[in-house]
Amino acid sequence: MSRYYTESDTPNIIFYRVPKVLILSERYKKMKPNALKLYIVLLDRLQLSMQNHWIDENGYYVRMSKEHGSDLLNISEPTFITSKKELHKLGLIEEKRVGLNKANLIYVLKVDYSDEDLYKIKKVDAEMLEGERKLKNLTFVQMKIQNKRLENRLCKMYKS
């Protein structure tokens, strides 16, 4: 079994989706890795909430206790709480208290981005594509040079 991905593997990959702006925007650049992981997991859980119609007057919500969240992300409970506070400060979640011994309702909010962020994302994507094109062209040119050298050697051998 090959460890390299192919197109046929795509439907079988179970993955988390990450908004590119979280990685590339100046606004979120200083976000701690644990807060980023928590947002990614909450965003994934939001899809499950939508499928199950877990919604109230504020919108779709997710429930995640500090015990479950810290265990899931393999972090301490204080780190989980700190990560949630960071997401609050960044405007990425809001919470609604439910009651004693119940996990709060967490509303996962959309990432904020500017036209500059969109430009940067498109630029990064374009640079990657251009870099790949240059590598392929370079490889093609290198092959042509190697073929020319081989031709020259073969011509010299036949002339001898």
Image (tube, rainbow, N blue to C red):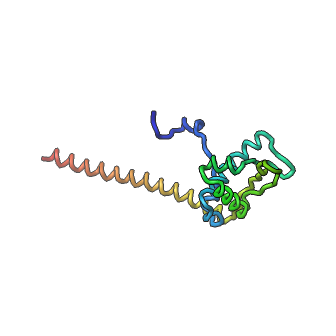
Splitting the image into 4 quarters, where does residue 120 fall? Answer: bottom right
The residue at 73%/42% (across/down) is 48
Say if residue 2 shows up in the picture. Answer: yes
Q: Position of residue 129 (x, y in %)?
A: 52, 54
| Horizontal relation, residue 54 to residue 155: left or right | right
The residue at 84%/52% (across/down) is 58
In the rendered image, the quadrant that contains the N terminus is top left
Question: Between 66 and 100, which is closer to the camera in this rendering?
Answer: 100
| Horizontal relation, residue 129 to residue 110: left or right | left
Instruction: Give the farthest residue toward the left.
Output: 160
Splitting the image into 4 quarters, where does residue 116 fall? Answer: bottom right
| Horizontal relation, residue 151 to residue 21: left or right | left
The residue at 43%/54% (across/down) is 135
Instruction: Give the farthest residue toward the right.
Output: 57
Does residue 39 sit above or below 50 in this rendering?
Answer: below
Say if residue 35 shows up in the picture. Answer: no
| Horizontal relation, residue 71 to residue 108: left or right | left
Instruction: Give the farthest residue toward the front.
Output: 100
Question: Between 63 and 75, which is closer to the camera in this rendering?
Answer: 75
Question: Between 103 and 153, which is closer to the camera in this rendering?
Answer: 103
Question: Between 139 and 5, which is closer to the camera in this rendering?
Answer: 5
